[in-house]
């Protein structure tokens, strides 16, 4: 009940501290009907796209249990600024995902990315647990051409060691494009809220996610 209450009380209506630009890239290579390997890269800039806020490199392995259920294991290496914007640190994360998909109606799809993370900071011996849950609703309007549809999502971060929600990422509107047969481009606006030691920080984010599948 405490987790449910925290999700409902996230302060998404606060004024933003600044604007960030995110570029994300997914590359997947299918090995057979069930197994795929890939890599994820992420670069986040702030202050008018002048300064690097975060970078992430993450090799990944995916297993398709069924067409509507995937299991995924990631190892992520990253450098990021903390939620209070006071310090920069290196992180190592081991991530396990359970990702189901539901076909709601013609053109409508509801998918989930449910991720459990083990996180080490600056090579230390201590680690922490974090849960991330992201429902996403896709509306496919066209099956051919550049423009394919719209989508929306919301991701909640829950830190078990702090026993509280520490971040929320809301995409109220995104656009799905297909510039190539094996390439998907998602352009989005994201409202990011992070919880520091004493206060919440809020950001406008303009981003692009490129996914390539082979």
Image (cartoon, grey):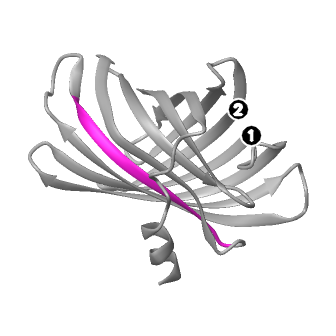
Quadrant in the rendering for residue 178: top left
Seen at 13% across and 42% down, the residue is 107
Crowd around label 1: few <14 · some 14–19 · many ≥20 (10 Å): some
Which residue in the rendered view is the most extreme toward the left?
Answer: 106
Residue 167 location in percent, x, y? Answer: 57, 55
**Magenta run includes residue 212:** no
Residue 179 location in percent, x, y? Answer: 32, 15
Q: Mark 2 and mark 1 in contact (Cβ < 8 Å)? A: yes
Q: Nearer the viewer, residue 5 or 94?
A: 5
Seen at 50% across and 58% down, the residue is 11
Reading the image, the residue beneath label 2 is 53
Is residue 40 something that shows in the picture?
no
**Magenta run includes residue 151:** yes
Judge left or right: residue 38 versus residue 101. right
Between disc 1 and disc 2, whose residue precedes? 2
Seen at 55% across and 39% down, the residue is 203
Q: Nearer the viewer, residue 53 or 79?
A: 53
Highlighted range, magenta: 149-160
Quadrant in the rendering for residue 56: top right
Judge left or right: residue 18 versus residue 186. right
Judge left or right: residue 105 versus residue 56. left
SS majority, magenta: strand
Reading the image, the residue beneath label 1 is 80
């Amino acid at each position: 009940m405490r987790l449910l209450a925290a999700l409902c009380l996230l302060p998404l209506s606060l004024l933003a501290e600044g604007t960030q630009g995110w570029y994300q890239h997914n590359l997947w290579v299918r090995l057979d009907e069930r197994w795929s390997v890939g890599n994820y890269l992420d670069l986040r800039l702030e202050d008018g796209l002048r300064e690097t806020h975060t970078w992430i490199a993450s090799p990944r392995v995916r297993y398709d249990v069924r067409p509507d259920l995937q299991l995924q294991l990631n190892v992520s290496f990253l450098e990021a600024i903390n939620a209070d914007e006071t310090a920069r640190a290196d992180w190592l994360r081991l991530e396990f995902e359970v990702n189901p998909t539901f076909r709601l109606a013609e053109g409508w799809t509801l998918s989930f990315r449910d991720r459990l993370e083990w996180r080490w900071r600056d090579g230390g011996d201590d680690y922490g647990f974090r849960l991330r849950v992201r429902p996403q609703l896709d509306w496919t309007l066209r099956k051919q051409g550049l423009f394919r549809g719209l989508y929306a999502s919301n991701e909640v971060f829950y830190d078990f060691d702090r026993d509280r929600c520490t971040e929320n990422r809301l995409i109220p509107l995104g656009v799905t494009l297909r510039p190539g047969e094996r390439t998907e481009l998602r352009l989005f606006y994201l409202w990011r809220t992070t919880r520091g030691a004493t206060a919440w920080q809020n950001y406008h984010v303009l981003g692009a996610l490129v996914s390539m599948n082979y």
